[in-house]
């Protein structure tokens, strides 16, 4: 997995072109006007697989990743009350989550303990003193991040359920109004899941091969738990990205809806309709639709903020952790390659595996944040393109535009900074700076060492 | 002279923008930057896909890459005696620094290949915008764009030639015939500059269109001013008493000077000296001169100057609504074109900025090394001479800064439209018009042209602040480590001179290796060019 | 520019004319065109003379620059080079961007005339010019304090230094050539402050008037008493204020155009001087040279904050104006004025479109955040360069 191989299933071609395959009025009598509105030359709408999709709420799409999180106690094992509502977990399930979290904390304490005792020394046999310290810090950071994740998740159980319910409600409304099913292909989450697992297993295997002598059970536990911690933190990040993607699709949907009213579309339609038939009034449904869109937009913003609230602490610690990991691994890679004659392929692979995992996760996260933020901010821009003749319509437009003047939507990491593509850029420039400094220091250090080596035999 | 393929007569009045690009197109076609069809361009002034062009371009790209590699190989030999052992990673990074020019060129060409269909669409959209502007009696003058392109081309040739020739004469050993290959070292930057001229001039054209819109609005205001004054007629004295009073010891001579200086200013701000309009606000307290000034202005602006009967569009709110609406739509369309253009060129711009940053730092650092009589990699030999360095640096930074400056200016121009719109509202003082203005100004607030390089950073002047800070810190770090390494080297040398010669060789090579990463990085590449 | 300026402004502009910073004739000058030509020529002459001096300093063999070690040398040379850049931009701007400056003063004259006239209307056309010197001083106190305060400090420190510091040919040469440049840059800096202060006064005036309007409307809505056409009256006044704001914004953009390059260059050179001198201070302490001339950076330390304080206080007026604007009550008890609210909306949109951000060439907004950033970067660079000291002292000593 390299940073470029991950392919996010963008809203697939079909949904992008026809985000609302068919408008169904609440009375189930498709009106001609509305059909005429939604798009020009439209292929016959695909047979709506209503019975199936009704039973297909959005979270089914990411059930794999959710089941992993549920099993590890990071997500509540909620009850599916109806297809548009989830309820709090039952007592036994809640107890299960509670139990798992307890086990995790116990293991953490055990690990911290064994890190400070010599029993884990065999894992840190490594080639240099400073590298051991590095690894040690990395381990501690990993433990910290994961513990934080568990704590925050435990605390936010209710919030997560609320956000999910809000998303489901929104979907229901959309379906009632437009008959559109906003489900999506989230295969990227599964791919990531597989990738993360593979990476972690690979890393463990490498580590086991690297350790000399017989490995004590403590070390096994330490290693295994380390891998699980890393994997689960990464999984949570993927989950957050998937949630953001879900929100993105909804923003995109309303933007598309609004796009139908812009002057560009109107002109195009005017050109098209001139020779066919008298065009039905373009703006006929604008008031109701726009009200619906404003409501949706507000709700989505609330959901977006809810998601942000749920995971921003985790994101901060994850970003810090992965910044550290990327830096140290790049540095190690450099040290390995420049070390004359004794390039160890084991450590090379290890570094590469770490780098791939973290870089791709960072890219995924910043990309989904950036996409969603851009889409959320695009609504007002699209609305600015709607030109209406009558005063009431103009007032409707003005209301929304006024509201959104100072409302910059952003996904922040606990208020420290906004996460989008520029974050990725900043992280990498910081990594470069540190690398330059570290490498220069290392070269100086080497020259000093060689000085001593040369002086000693002669004197 | 315009021979546009168009159905209606109104369209033929609009010159396509691409007509001004002919010279640039031919040069870039020969250099292999654009794959578009030559014949179509010559006859119809359109950019269309062409398979032959694509093949030609790819062939050129391959030739350039081969030549460049040969260059690196042949000039790397000079370094080969210098270095005995090299590590692998310095090699990788050195590869990067040496090949960044090539990477930049490749990005440009491949992006042009990818975009070959879409660039034509872009210019078609610009033409449509021109038509719509023409319908609103707002003519955009493309004629000086050709001159601008010529000027940029001349500057490019001057810079490239001066750097190339100066380096060749002063610093390259031209007794060998292989030294002719040095010419190849100028190819990547040249091609990159040509590509950027396309972008810069198109951006400039967009800026002109924004300014034309602003101009139209300002003219509306000016005519309305005149109209109001005409209405007041002989009551002028009383209205003046309302607005402002003449100070008793009024120095008309000085006033005139200030007004003349200030009045011309708005016109000069517009960049094009084509139509100068007296600024609006100061004609509120109307003296004889200001009427004269605005009269002159309207004479210069052909479309509106006809109405000497003193009519103002702004007095008729419902009529002007249509016009303002259309102008806003055109504004939005230009914004969209700007975004599309930015997207087409986003990777080339990113690579250009990376190139600028790296080369600027490296060149300055090697200049420092050269002043300390340390050896520097042969591909950066222009750093041995401070004057050539200055030229090269101003060339590179000029490219980057101009693009940044231009995109900043463009977004400023797009933001000025709102100001002009509000002037319309204020001067007309009509409730109906206020409603329209409020509505449109809200819309304008939501039109945005922000240029960015792949979303990583925005192209405005604040980026310059960050970049210059970055260059300074890296330079200090590098120089500092260089000093430290030199010191260590001297210590070793004095130490070695006391001892046997046996250890000398080893120590020297070791220390050489340490001398500085950056230096290592580059020279390594010379050593093992094939990888 | 109106027929007259108040005394303080007149005097200081005259001073700037003498220094070659203000290339426009003042009211009261006879034959303004000729004066303008003369002033331009004077600026050019000053520029050439000073540049010649800097070139001599940089190239001569005398002890203008610190000769005893490499880094003292580079430091001094850096100071000279950046002052030269600043000089170049200052005088080039004085000669080239007269239009913007003229427009600035023209608008200023127009606005202040309008104000005076209003006051006269209020006071019932009494005496036309009762402006005393004292009130002028009060009006321009910020500018005067920042001008004379730093000036006094600089002179004081200079005197003290020459009492304490053992004389030395290098120091004499260096400071006798460098000090004029410092003074010039400092006065230019204060010139920026003067212009920004004028802008701020206009904005403050606007805010006061809007505040009055808000009070009227509140009074009317609370008591229900108002005269006929009250809404119409308010709307007219608001429209007038919109025009005033438009003019003020144009003044601001003229200021930006007239001074952007020299703001950048002056701030940069002061910044470089501070950074270099801070480092040099540490260096002299480290190698134990009895050299106290680093105490001369104290005034320079205040210059940037003085500038930034002026620009910040100018920029904070804008939210206050918007606040006052929205304090105007649109529907009084007896009647409501939809037109008035329309007008308020229009004005607030206008403010949104015409923000007042003093930034040199768009590079960075000059507010207090910049101060912290400058402090941070000076600190970072000092840390970098301090690490160089031991290496250097080995190499060159």
Image: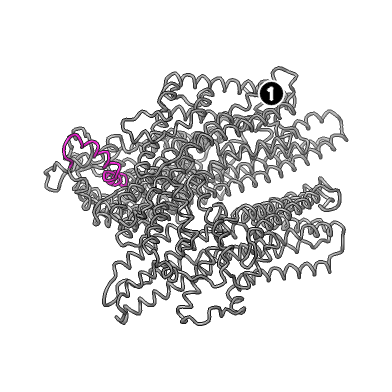
Q: Is residue A267 magenta?
A: yes
Q: Nearer the viewer, residue B482 or B251?
A: B251
Q: Is residue B182 left or right of residue B371?
A: left
Q: Which residues are magenta?
A: A250-279
Location of residue A58 in the rendering, given as x and y in whole percent from the top left corner: 27, 44
Q: Quadrant of residue B221?
A: bottom left
Q: Is residue B515 visible?
A: yes
- The answer to whether residue C338 is above or below residue B465 is below
Residue at mark 1: chain: B
**In which quarter of the view is residue C346 placed?**
bottom left
Say which quadrant the N terminus of chain B sits in: top left
Q: Residues within 10 Å of mark 1 (few under 14, many from 20)?
A: many
In the depicted view, which residue is nearer to us: B149 or A147?
B149
| Mark 1: secondary structure | helix
For the stretch drawn in magenta, the main secondary structure is helix
On the picture, is C299 further left or further right than B114? right
Residue that label 1 marks = B75
Q: Position of residue C295 (x, y in %)?
A: 75, 64
Whether residue A107 is visible: no
| Spot occupied by residue B201 in the image (x, y as percentages of width and height) | 50, 37
Give the vertical position of B106 relative to B434 (above or below): above
**Apparent side of residue C149 relative to residue B117 in the rendered image (left or right):** right
Q: Nearer the viewer, residue C360 or A318?
A: C360
Vertical side of C81 occupied by C18: above or below:
below
Q: How is the image coloured?
A: one colour
How many numbered discs sit on the rendered protein? 1
The stretch drawn in magenta includes residue B325: no
Q: Position of residue B398 (x, y in %)?
A: 60, 40
- Towards the viewer: B30 or A383: B30
Figure quadrant of the C terminus of chain B: top right
């Amino acid at each position: 997995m390299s940073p470029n191989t991950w392919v996010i299933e963008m809203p697939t071609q079909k949904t992008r072109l026809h985000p609302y395959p068919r408008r169904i009025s609440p009375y189930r009598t498709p009106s001609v006007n509305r059909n005429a509105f939604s798009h020009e030359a439209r292929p016959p709408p695909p047979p709506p697989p209503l019975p199936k999709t009704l039973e297909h709420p959005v979270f089914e799409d990411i059930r794999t990743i959710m089941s992993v999180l549920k099993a590890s106690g990071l997500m509540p094992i909620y009850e599916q009350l109806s297809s548009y509502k989830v309820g709090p977990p039952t007592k036994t399930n809640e107890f299960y989550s509670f139990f798992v979290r307890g086990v995790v904390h116990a293991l953490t304490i055990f690990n911290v303990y064994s890190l400070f005792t010599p029993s884990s020394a065999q894992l840190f046999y490594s080639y240099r003193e400073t590298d051991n310290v590095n690894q040690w810090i990395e381990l501690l950071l990993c433990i910290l991040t994961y513990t934080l994740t568990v704590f925050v998740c435990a605390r936010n159980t209710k919030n997560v359920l609320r956000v999910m319910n809000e998303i489901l409600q929104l979907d229901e409304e959309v379906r009632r109004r437009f008959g559109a099913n906003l489900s999506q292909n989230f295969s990227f989450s599964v791919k990531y899941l597989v990738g993360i697992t593979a990476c972690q297993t690979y890393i463990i295997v490498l580590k086991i091969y690297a350790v000399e002598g017989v490995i004590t059970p403590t070390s096994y536990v330490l290693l295994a738990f380390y891998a699980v911690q890393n994997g689960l933190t990464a999984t949570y990040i993927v989950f957050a990205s998937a949630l953001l993607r879900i929100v993105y699709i909804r923003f995109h949907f309303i933007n598309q809806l609004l796009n139908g009213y812009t002057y560009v579309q109107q002109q195009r339609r005017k050109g098209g309709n001139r020779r066919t038939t008298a065009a039905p009034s373009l703006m006929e449904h604008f008031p109701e639709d726009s009200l619906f869109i404003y409501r949706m937009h507000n709700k989505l913003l609330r959901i977006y903020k809810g998601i942000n609230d749920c995971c921003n602490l985790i994101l901060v610690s994850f970003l810090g952790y992965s910044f550290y990991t990327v830096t140290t691994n790049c540095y190690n890679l450099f040290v390995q390659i420049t070390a004359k004659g004794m390039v160890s392929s084991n450590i090379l692979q290890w570094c590469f595996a770490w780098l791939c995992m973290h870089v791709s996760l960072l890219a995924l996260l910043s990309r989904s944040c950036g996409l969603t933020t851009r889409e959320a901010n695009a609504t007002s821009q699209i609305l600015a393109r709607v030109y209406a003749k009558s005063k009431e319509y103009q007032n409707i437009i003005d209301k929304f535009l006024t509201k959104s003047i100072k409302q910059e939507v952003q996904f922040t990491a606990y208020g420290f900074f906004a996460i989008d593509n520029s974050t990725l850029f900043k992280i990498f420039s910081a990594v470069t700076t540190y690398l330059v400094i570290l490498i220069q220091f290392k070269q100086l250090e080497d020259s000093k060492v060689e000085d001593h080596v040369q002086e000693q035999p002669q004197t | 002279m315009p021979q546009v393929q168009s159905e209606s007569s109104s369209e033929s009045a609009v010159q396509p923008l691409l007509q001004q690009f002919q010279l640039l197109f031919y040069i870039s076609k020969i250099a292999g930057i654009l794959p578009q069809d030559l014949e179509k361009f010559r006859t119809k002034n359109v950019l269309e896909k062409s398979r032959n062009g694509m093949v030609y371009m790819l062939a050129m790209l391959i030739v350039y890459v081969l030549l460049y590699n040969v260059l690196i190989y042949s000039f790397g030999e000079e370094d080969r005696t210098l270095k005995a052992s090299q590590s692998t990673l310095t090699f990788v990074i050195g590869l990067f620094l040496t090949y960044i020019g090539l990477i930049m060129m490749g990005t440009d060409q491949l992006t042009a290949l990818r975009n070959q269909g879409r660039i034509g669409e872009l210019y078609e959209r610009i033409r449509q915008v021109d038509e719509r502007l023409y319908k609103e009696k707002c003519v955009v003058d493309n004629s000086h764009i050709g001159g601008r392109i010529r000027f940029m081309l001349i500057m490019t040739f001057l810079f490239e030639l001066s750097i190339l020739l100066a380096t060749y004469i002063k610093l390259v050993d031209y007794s060998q015939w292989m030294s002719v290959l040095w010419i190849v070292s100028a190819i990547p930057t040249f091609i990159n500059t040509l590509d950027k001229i396309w972008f810069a001039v198109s951006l400039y054209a967009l800026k002109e269109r924004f300014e034309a819109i602003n101009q139209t609005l300002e003219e509306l205001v000016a005519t309305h001013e005149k109209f109001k004054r005409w209405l007041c007629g002989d009551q002028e004295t009383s209205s003046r008493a309302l607005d402002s009073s003449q100070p008793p010891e009024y120095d008309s001579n000085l006033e005139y000077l200030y007004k003349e200086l200030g009045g011309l200013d708005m016109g000069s701000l517009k960049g094009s000296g084509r139509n100068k309009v007296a600024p609006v606000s100061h004609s509120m307290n109307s003296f004889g001169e200001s009427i004269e000034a605005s009269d002159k202005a309207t004479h210069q602006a052909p479309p509106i100057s006809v109405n000497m009967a003193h009519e103002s569009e702004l007095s008729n709110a419902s009529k002007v609504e249509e016009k303002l609406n259309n102008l806003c739509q055109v504004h939005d369309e230009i914004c969209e074109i700007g975004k599309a253009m930015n997207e087409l060129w986003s990777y080339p711009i990113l690579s250009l900025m990376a190139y600028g940053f790296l080369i600027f730092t490296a060149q300055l650092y090697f200049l420092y090394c050269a002043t300390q009589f340390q050896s520097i990699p042969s591909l950066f030999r222009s750093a041995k001479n401070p004057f050539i360095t200055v030229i090269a640096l101003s060339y590179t930074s000029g490219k980057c800064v101009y693009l940044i400056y231009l995109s900043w200016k463009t977004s400023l121009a797009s933001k000025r439209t709102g100001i002009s719109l509000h002037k319309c509202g204020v001067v007309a003082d009509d409730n109906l018009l206020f409603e329209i203005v409020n509505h449109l100004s809200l819309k304008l607030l939501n039109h945005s042209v922000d240029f960015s390089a792949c979303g990583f950073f925005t192209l405005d002047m604040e980026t310059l602040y960050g970049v210059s800070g970055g260059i300074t810190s890296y330079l200090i770090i590098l120089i500092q480590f260089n000093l430290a390494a030199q010191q260590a080297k001297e210590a070793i040398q004095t130490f070695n001179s006391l001892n046997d010669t046996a250890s000398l060789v080893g120590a020297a090579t070791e220390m050489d290796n340490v001398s500085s990463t950056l230096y290592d990085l580059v020279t390594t590449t010379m050593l093992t060019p094939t990888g | 520019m109106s027929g007259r300026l108040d005394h303080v402004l007149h005097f200081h502009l005259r001073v700037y004319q003498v220094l070659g910073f203000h290339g426009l004739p003042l009211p009261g000058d006879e034959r303004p065109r000729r004066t303008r030509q003369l002033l331009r020529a004077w600026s050019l002459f000053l520029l050439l003379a000073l540049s010649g001096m800097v070139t001599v300093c940089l190239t001569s063999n005398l002890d203008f620059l610190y000769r005893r070690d490499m880094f003292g040398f580079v430091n001094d040379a850096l100071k000279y080079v950046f002052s030269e850049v600043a000089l170049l931009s200052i005088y080039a701007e004085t000669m080239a961007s007269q239009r913007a400056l003229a427009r600035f003063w023209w608008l200023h004259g127009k606005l202040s005339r309008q104000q005076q006239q209003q006051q006269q209307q209020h006071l019932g056309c009494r005496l036309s010019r009762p402006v005393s010197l004292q009130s002028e001083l009060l009006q321009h106190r910020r500018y005067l304090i920042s001008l004379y305060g730093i000036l006094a400090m600089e002179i004081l420190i200079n005197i003290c230094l020459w009492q304490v510091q053992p004389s030395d040919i290098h120091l004499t040469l260096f400071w006798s050539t460098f000090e004029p440049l410092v003074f010039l840059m400092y006065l230019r800096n204060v010139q920026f402050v003067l212009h920004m202060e004028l802008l701020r006064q206009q904005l403050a005036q606007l805010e006061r008037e809007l505040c009055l309007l808000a009070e009227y409307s509140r009074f009317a809505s609370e008591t229900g008493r108002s005269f006929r056409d009250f809404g119409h009256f308010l709307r007219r006044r608001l429209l007038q204020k919109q025009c005033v704001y438009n003019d003020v914004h144009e003044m601001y953009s003229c200021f930006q155009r007239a001074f952007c390059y020299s703001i950048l260059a002056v701030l940069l050179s002061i910044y470089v001087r501070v950074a270099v001198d801070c480092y040099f201070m540490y260096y002299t302490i480290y190698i134990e040279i009895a050299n106290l001339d680093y105490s001369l950076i104290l005034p320079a330390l205040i210059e940037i904050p003085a500038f930034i304080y002026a620009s910040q206080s100018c920029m904070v007026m804008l939210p206050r104006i918007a606040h006052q604007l929205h304090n105007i009550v649109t529907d009084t008890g007896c009647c409501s004025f939809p037109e008035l609210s329309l007008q308020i909306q229009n004005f607030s949109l206008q403010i949104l479109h015409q923000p007042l951000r003093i930034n040199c060439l768009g590079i960075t907004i000059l507010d207090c955040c910049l101060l912290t950033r400058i402090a941070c970067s000076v600190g970072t660079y000092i840390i970098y360069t301090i690490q160089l000291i031991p290496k250097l002292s080995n190499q060159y000593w």
